[in-house]
Image (spheres, rainbow, N blue to C red):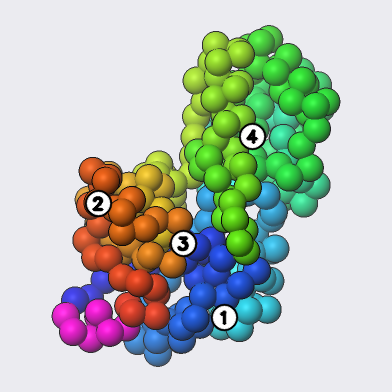
Amino acid sequence: MRFTGFMIDMDGTVYKGGDLIPGATDFISYLKRSNIPFVFLTNNSSHSRDFYYNKLVRMGFDVTMDNVLTSNIATIRFVLSERPGKKVYVVGSPDVIEEVRAAGIRVVDDDPDIVYLTFDRTITYDKINKAYKALCNGAELIATHPDDLCPTENDYDIDIGPFIRMFEQMCQTHAVVVGKPNGLMLEMAALHMSVDPKGTVMVGDRLYTDIRMGELAGTATILVLSGETSRKDLEESGIRPTYVLDSVADIPGLLSRN
């Protein structure tokens, strides 16, 4: 078994909240020793890419900034490519807003062409109302990812999904969603690694984002049971990963057996 590259989810896959999943750093060391390209993918857009890179380094991962691709970075690239010159109102935390602005997107507070929705832990009623009015006035809704819940150390927090549905219902619009399971994330990750996307493998703990993205793209998938999905969830789902393992610590053994 030889994959062209590994796409690896973060929350629930190599860490959960602030806790490192045992064996995760050894797994990354194995990929590096084996000269197998990899990139971390996260739908979590509550912080900039710098935040996730620094978090991985603090936890002991031997990585560079180029090993990290967030849904916010993917959405930035989408807007720059597909909506060049558009004015954007960002519903996001200060570091995320600055990341969008620094990329060259026209960030505004009033009269936007796009409402750019992220997982905003600093959200306020004023932000919600401003986005609502802009959407009712014809702005396009673009969201970084579709997740309903975000894992924490011991539980889950409400993520961006309910806000997407609220704005779609209230404003009679339909969001463009860039993150997993959208194939854009997979294509960007493969381009990031300079590999053939068809030979990549997606590793993650969520059926409806991580595994679904690989399934839709026709690539191999590894579901790990260290995060959101239980064996019962898997049995009740119509989504079928290529492999099912307890955690990423088991992947080197899988590769050596095959």
Mark positioned earlier in the residue sequence (2 or 4): 4
Q: Secondary structure at mark 4?
A: strand
Circles 2 and 1, Cβ within 8 Å, touching? The answer is: no
Say the numbered circle drawn on residue 117: 4
- Which percent across, then down, holds residue 162? 57, 31
Name the amino acid type tagged 1.
Phe
Residue in the picture at 27% in, 45% down: 237
Left or right of 26, for residue 163: right
| Numbered mark located on residue 61 in the image | 1
Above or below for 108 versus 64: above
Label the magenta part by its dominant secondary structure. helix
Among all residues in the image, which is located at the extreme bottom? 33
Give the CA distance from mark 2 to mark 1: 33 Å
Position of the C terminus, as image quadrant, is bottom left
Q: Position of residue 21 (x, y in %)?
A: 51, 75
Identify which amino acid the numbered label 2 is placed on.
Answer: Glu
- Give the quarter of the image for residue 83: top right
Residue 127 painted magenta: no
Q: CA distance from mark 3 to mark 4?
A: 25 Å
| 256 part of magenta stretch | yes
What's the magenta region? Answer: 252-258
Instruction: Name the outermost residue toward the left.
Output: 258
Disc 3 marks which residue?
Answer: 227
Q: Which residue is mark 2?
A: 235
**Residue 201 at x, y = what percent?**
31, 63
State which tag comes first along the sequence, 4 or 1. 1
- Identify the residue at horizontal 61%, vertical 61% (top origin): 154
Report x, y in % for residue 20.
57, 75
The image shows residue 14, relative to residue 12, as above or below, that is below
